Amino acid sequence: MRIKITKSLELSAQASNRDNPSEDSFPAGEYLASLTPEGKIEVINAKKSKALLSFSQFREKISLGEFIVIEA
């Protein structure tokens, strides 16, 4: 799916070359997102960092207008 982040956010992310999660910047713009086998929503930025959100966190960001689903 494709989502749009309406304002820059700091999300807990894990880079492909790091083992420890950290805060990473996700500037406003469009991102790819997918559902993981664990039931999390994975948002990937250009740095190959991946933010994992629970479905309730993802739904909250949509209700606050921080995320917009462009394509499911």
Image (cartoon, rainbow, N blue to C red):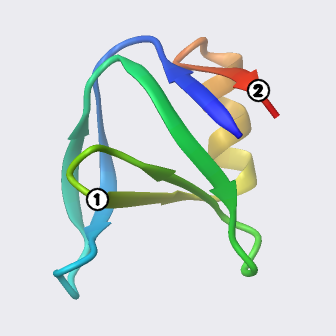
Q: Amino acid at mark 1?
A: Lys
Give me the disc on residue 60.
Answer: none
Left or right, 62 with respect to 28, comes to: right
The vertical placement of 16 against 65, above or below, is below
The vertical placement of 23 against 32, above or below, is: below
Residue 10: image x %, image y %?
Answer: 26, 38
Q: Residue furthest right?
A: 72
Q: Is residue 48 left or right of residue 24?
A: right
Mark 2 vs mark 1: which is more N-terminal? 1
**Residue 50 percent location from the top left of the image:** 39, 60
Residue 15: give x, y in percent of width and height.
24, 69
Residue occupying the point 60% across, 28% down: 3
Q: Residues within 10 Å of mark 1 (few under 14, many from 20)?
A: few
* Residue at left offset 36%, top offset 13%: 7
Percent from the top left, x then y, of residue 17? 17, 81
Q: Tell me what residue is drawn at x 17 percent, y 81 percent.
A: 18
**Element assignment for label 2:** strand
Name the quadrant containing residue 58. Answer: top right
Instruction: From the image, tell me which residue sits under label 1.
Output: 48
- Where 12 falls versus 33 (above or below)? below
Q: Quadrant of the C terminus?
A: top right
Gap in angstroms between the C-alphas marked 2 and 1: 21 Å
Q: Which mark is residue 71?
A: 2
